[in-house]
Image: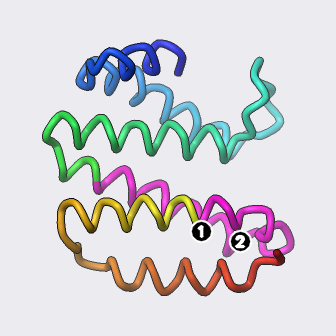
Amino acid sequence: MNRSSSLIDSNRWRQACNFLGCSFELAEWLLDNPQLSTQDNLRPMDRFMVTGHQLAECMGRSEREDLELHFLLTVHLRLVDWVKHRRPEYWLLKQHLQISLAMLNRYSQRRGGFKGYYDCCVEAEWYIKQCIN
């Protein structure tokens, strides 16, 4: 993640994608294995969202809008699935849902709507309303 951040800072998007792809896969793996400790203080969902959104951004900057949307939706759908199956804890993820929805809105404004956009928004808004403030 540190190496990809350096590459992003120097606008080397394609090279950053290589590092972020690996980071994203590891972040997804850590979601299912939270008992494994990491040396930084990022929670597994935070790491997953940061790497996924950075990877989507790099894909978009590398003119791969199809993959940009793919990673935005992968993050969003995994988050919604996480919320669905962990209802007692889902109020902790309100901000994550808001960020994910904002990223999808940003994509839609820049690139146009996509199939399923409305459904993503409705579902996310419903869960956001259910979250305890």
Q: Residue at x 33, y 77 (%)?
A: 117
Q: Residue at x 26, y 18 (%)?
A: 12
State the separation of the CA atoms marked 1 and 2. 6 Å
The crowd level at tag 2 (other Cα within 10 Å; few <14, some 14-19, many 20+) is few
What secondary structure predominates along the stretch shown in magenta? helix
Marking on residue 129? none
In the depicted view, which residue is nearer to us: 57 or 38? 57
Q: Amino acid at mark 2?
A: His
User: Image height check: is 51 above or below 124?
Assistant: above
Residue 53: horizontal and vertical position, in percent?
Answer: 44, 45
Q: Residue at x 58, y 36 (%)?
A: 27
Check the image and name the residue furthest to the left. 63
| Residue labelled with disc 1 | 81
Marking on residue 85? 2
In the depicted view, which residue is nearer to us: 120 or 86? 120
The crowd level at tag 1 (other Cα within 10 Å; few <14, some 14-19, many 20+) is few
Q: Quadrant of the C terminus?
A: bottom right
Q: Is residue 42 left or right of residue 58?
A: right
Residue 82: horizontal and vertical position, in percent?
Answer: 65, 64
Q: Residue at x 86, y 73 (%)?
A: 88
Asked whether 77 falls inside the magenta stretch, the response is yes
